[in-house]
Amino acid sequence: MDGINLGHILFSFEGRINRGKFWLGWLLVWVLQFVVFFLVLSSPGAGSVVFLLILLLLWPTLAIQVKRWHDRDKSGAWILIVLVPIIGPLWAFVETGFVEGTRGPNRYGPDPLGGHGRSPYGPGPSLMEPAPEIPPGWYADPHHRHQHRYWNGSAWTEHVGDDGVQGTDPLPHT
């Protein structure tokens, strides 16, 4: 994890962080929460100070989550999914903690892992050919006209699929 900037991880709502930095940030927040909890148990009169510390820990908690949603190319408003009973927190836990972020740059900044934007679909909807190392197979149609389009290992073909039904559609001219 090169270039760890704890100030950015814990306090900024801008940019993106990868899963490793997300878990590092969560670890730091959990350690601080444990310390606050220990203060409550050891100092019964520290209630107002503890409440203030818990409020202060809310900022880094939100900042860490917002940057992970950004890495998934989603608005920070997705943090509100946790308000949906049961499913919301589970969804947020899986998507921010375990699902890979967007490869390459997205609208929230460069790839925190340094990716160059190469994916089976290319870096944008207008790119016709993905990276050459992508094996032949069915991928999401880069032209967004069908659910899938077949990549033969070197070029997109006219073979398409929608809801399990295969057909042909000539490649659009770019």
Image (cartoon, helix red, strand yellow):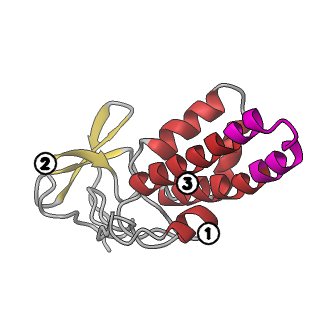
Residue 22 shows in this picture: yes
Tell me the amino acid under the disc marked 1. Ser
Q: Quadrant of the N terminus?
A: bottom left
- Range of the magenta residues? 37-54
**Residue 136 belongs to the span the image colors magenta:** no
Q: Residue at x 80, y 46 (%)?
A: 50
Q: Nearer the viewer, mark 1 or mark 2?
A: 1
Q: Residue at x 71, y 45 (%)?
A: 80
Disc 1, SS: loop
What mark, if any, has residue 81 been given in the picture? none
Between residue 171 and residue 27, name the one nearer to us. Answer: 27
Between residue 126 and residue 130, name the one nearer to us. Answer: 130
Q: Position of residue 124 (x, y in %)?
A: 38, 68
Disc 2, SS: loop
Quadrant position of residue 126: bottom left
Quadrant position of residue 133: bottom left
**Mark 1 / mark 2, whichever is N-terminal:** 1
Tell me the amino acid under the disc marked 3. Trp
**Mark 3 / mark 1, whichever is N-terminal:** 1
Residue where numbered disc 1 is placed? 12
In the rendered image, the vertical position of residue 133 relative to residue 135, given as above or below: below
